[in-house]
Amino acid sequence: MKLFLKMVVFLMALAMAGMAPAADRGTAEEAVALVKKVVADMKKYGKDKVIKDIQNQAPDYKDRDLYVSVGTLDGMNLANGNNPKLAGKNIIDLKDADGTFITRERIDIAKKKGSGWQEYKWPDPITKEIQKKAMYVERYEDLTIACGVYKN
């Protein structure tokens, strides 16, 4: 009987562990809301302050696996809430695991549509594995503001 109870507890723990990552994931709606928050805050506080806060990984602009990236329309990264080392680098030729020029595509969406979604493959900050990612992009003045969700 003790063995049976131990097995039940073990299986329940496994099941709960399997459900935990879903709770640790941001949704598409939350990604859009985070981008909209960045734009609203830039209008209220100024672009420089918000870019600095994103670069410093302020909790207002980072939530679980959701983080914001800000770039210029010529490919310069100004802030990346997950990888601050990208700031100040021109990433126009940055490719994903399949060879897609993701920054060029992001700029194209911003210029032609004003906002939209792009899909590519990128390292997941939680699992560290290459995952499918959907990134919401919105243009604000001369910037691209983006936040994405990982699709396991």
Image (cartoon, helix red, strand yellow):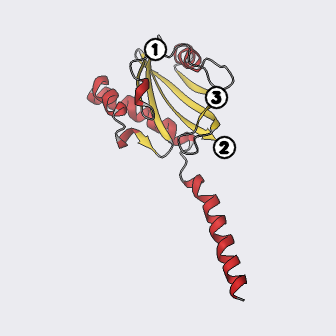
Image location (x, y in percent) of residue 45: 27, 29
Q: Counting other residues with Cα less than 10 Å from the Cα at mark 1, is it few (<14), some (14-19), or many (20 or more)?
A: some
Q: Amino acid at mark 2?
A: Asn
Q: Is residue 78 above or below residue 149?
A: above
Q: Is residue 133 above or below residue 25?
A: above
Q: Which mark is residue 152?
A: 2
In the rendered image, which residue does mark 1 sit on? 90
Numbered disc 2: secondary structure: loop
Choose the circle earlier in sequence order: 3 or 2: 3
Callout 1 secondary element? loop
Q: In percent of the image, x 32 and y 23: which residue is there?
A: 47
**Type of amino acid under label 3:** Glu
Q: Please name which of the two marks, 1 or 2, marks the residue nearer to the observer.
A: 1
Q: Residue at x 61, y 26 (%)?
A: 118
Percent of width and height locating residue 124: 57, 39
Give the left or right position of residue 72, taking residue 19 as reference. left
Q: Provide the residue designation for mark 3.
A: 119
State the residue at coordinates (53%, 51%): 24
Tell me the SS state at disc 3: strand
Q: Residue furthest top?
A: 74
| Foreground residue among 150 and 126 | 126
